[in-house]
Amino acid sequence: VILKLMISRDGKIQQVDYNKRADFNSLNKAATRAVKNATPYPPAPKHLYGESFEVIMPIKFRLAG
C-alpha cells in the first residue's frame, strides 16, 4: 500500500489518499488506521515554507506463519 498524506504544519493529518492500493481491502484499511493512530506527527521544521505538506508513505505487509 502506498499512501499519500497531507499533513499540517503542526503534524496533524488533513487528508489520506491512496497512491497504490493492495489487492485486499483489509490491508488498505489497516494502513490507513496505522498512519492515523501514529498522530500527531512532529511539527514541520521552521525553515520549511507552507502550511501543509504532502508525504508519500509506503506501507509493507508481511505474512508470517
Image (cartoon, rainbow, N blue to C red):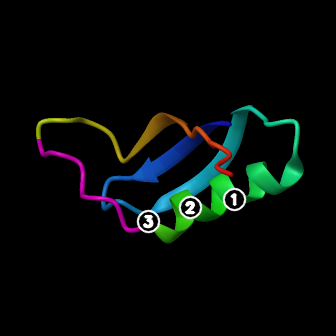
Nearer to me, 53 or 22: 22
Q: What is the three-letter code of the residue carrying label 3?
A: Ala
Query: Residue 50 lies in magenta, yes or no?
Result: no
Query: Split into 4 quadrants, where in the image is the N terminus?
Result: top right
Residue at 79% over, 37% down: 22
Residues at discs 2 and 3 in contact (Cβ within 8 Å):
yes
Q: What is the three-letter code of the residue carrying label 2?
A: Ala
Residues at discs 2 and 1 in contact (Cβ within 8 Å):
yes
Q: Secondary structure at mark 1?
A: helix
**Residue at mark 3:** 38
**Residue at mark 2:** 34
Residue at 52% over, 46% down: 6
Q: Residues within 10 Å of mark 1 (few under 14, many from 20)?
A: some
Q: Residues within 10 Å of mark 2 (few under 14, many from 20)?
A: few
Residue at 64% over, 49% down: 64
**Residue at mark 1:** 30
**Above or below, comparing residue 28 to residue 40 in the picture:** above
Q: Secondary structure at mark 2?
A: helix
Q: Residue furthest front?
A: 65
The Cα–Cα distance between marks 2 and 3, rounded to whole angstroms, is: 6 Å
Nearer to me, 30 or 45: 30
Q: What is the three-letter code of the residue carrying label 1?
A: Ala
Q: Which residues are magenta?
A: 39-46
Residue at 69% over, 59% down: 30
Query: Magenta: predominant secondary structure element?
Result: loop
**Above or below, comparing residue 4 to residue 37 in the picture:** above
Residue 52: horizontal and vertical position, in percent? Answer: 41, 46
- Residue 26 occupies which quadrant of the picture? bottom right
**Above or below, comparing residue 2 to residue 17 in the picture:** above
